Amino acid sequence: MARWAARELSEIPKVTDGDADDPDWHPLQHFFGLTAFGANVFVAGRGGQTLVEEHDERASGQEELYLVLDGEADFELDGERVHAARGTVVAVPDPSVRRSAVARSAGTALLAVGSGPGAFATTWRESHFADLPRADEPG
């Protein structure tokens, strides 16, 4: 396996299962041979297309993070709707949260990253983040 690789998204083969209703699925984790976390990009062919099927991660225990790379998507998180424009990050650290996402327009691209808790060990010092708030802290 190569020690590093770089590709345009268009060069990464898409998963196809014959379902014309599915978005383009670029399996980053598989293509690059990553084993520490899952990573995929989903690209909508039309508005209203499901990018993330409704699911939870209770069985796997995974935490997930989504980044809207282009376009806009509507997420549903345990029954709450969240509109996510380009550049919006949606973090779901609780595996029991039911989640789904639908593209608002063709070309909406969504990066999905997931892994089980404890798989990551930071190399940064805590002092780097001493004055930075977290999402779950009041503003």
Image (tube, rainbow, N blue to C red):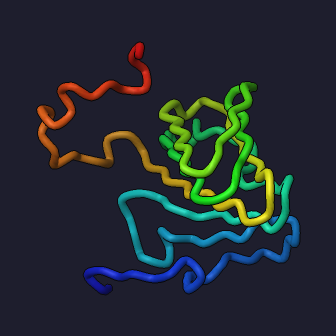
The answer to whether 103 appears left or right of 39 in the picture is right
Most extreme residue toward the top, as rendered? 138
Q: Position of residue 127 (x, y in %)?
A: 12, 32
Q: Position of residue 74 (x, y in %)?
A: 74, 42
Q: Position of residue 32 (x, y in %)?
A: 43, 77
Q: Position of residue 124 (x, y in %)?
A: 16, 45
Question: Which residue is at 65% across, 61% downward?
Answer: 109
Question: Which residue is at 84% across, 63% downward?
Answer: 46
Vertical arrangement, residue 4 with respect to residue 67, above or below: below
Question: Which residue is at 63% across, 59% downward?
Answer: 70
Q: Quadrant of residue 3?
A: bottom left
Q: Nearer the viewer, residue 25 or 45?
A: 45
Vertical arrangement, residue 44 with respect to residue 95, above or below: below
Count of numbered tags? 0
Image quarter in which the C terminus is found: top left
The answer to whether 69 appears left or right of 25 in the picture is left
Q: Nearer the viewer, residue 52 or 88?
A: 88
Image quarter in which the N terminus is found: bottom left
Vertical arrangement, residue 72 with respect to residue 31, above or below: above
Question: Which residue is at 79% across, 51% downward?
Answer: 104
